[in-house]
Image (cartoon, rainbow, N blue to C red):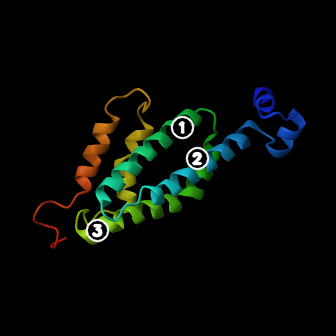
Amino acid sequence: MQAIGRAAGVGQGTLYRHFPTRESLLLEVYDDDFQNLIEAAATVHDAGDPVGSLRSWLDHLAAFGRKKHALSDVLRAAARRELHDRHYALILEAIDGLLDDGRRTGEIRRDLDADELLALVSFLWQIDTTTDERVPHLLDLVVDGCRTPRGKAHQM
């Protein structure tokens, strides 16, 4: 906390008034990163290429996963649960927005729900996304599984 206060140009008293614990500071950083992830869903949105938009956002999710993985050792289990409960509905809403365009065009499976896609990419929190070279390929495989099987666009 001393180093953070110095880098921010504030005294420790000021820092502790706003963030009484290291965890409270990290929760604020996490909230900010999470908000950026939600906003990225709108930023990558391209109605002309819904599958490309989904894949691009999954890259943002992978970057978020790297940060979350790095913070996980510091945050206590109770804090992680609070973050999960607070953000889960928002992340599902962002994913649904990305899936909807593809469902409308028939490019994305109609039987795919946002929570299922999130479960499919949960590997991002299990592997080191900073060094594991399989991450882009794994995300491509997930997106391929989200596509409507050929010849079934109108049946699903």
Residue at the disc numbered 2: 33
Query: Image quadrant of residue 2?
Result: top right
The answer to whether residue 126 is left or right of residue 48 is: right
Front position in the image: 156 or 54: 54
Q: Are marks 1 and 2 in contact (CB under 8 Å)?
A: yes
Above or below for 111 versus 30: below
Quote the CA–CA distance across marks 1 and 2: 8 Å
Residue that appears at 57% across and 36% down = 72
**Of the numbered discs in the image, which one, if any, rests on residue 46?**
none
Residue at the disc numbered 3: 103
Quadrant where the N terminus sits is top right
Front position in the image: 133 or 44: 44
Residue that appears at 80% across and 32% down = 5
N-terminal-most mark, 2 or 3: 2
N-terminal-most mark, 1 or 2: 2
What is the crowding at mark 3: few (fewer than 14 residues within 10 Å), some, or many (at least 20)? many
What is the crowding at mark 1: few (fewer than 14 residues within 10 Å), some, or many (at least 20)? some
Q: Amino acid at mark 2?
A: Asp
**Of the numbered discs in the image, which one, if any, rests on residue 67?**
1
N-terminal-most mark, 3 or 1: 1
Q: Secondary structure at mark 2?
A: helix
Q: Secondary structure at mark 1?
A: helix
Q: Amino acid at mark 1?
A: Lys
Query: Image quadrant of residue 141?
Result: top left
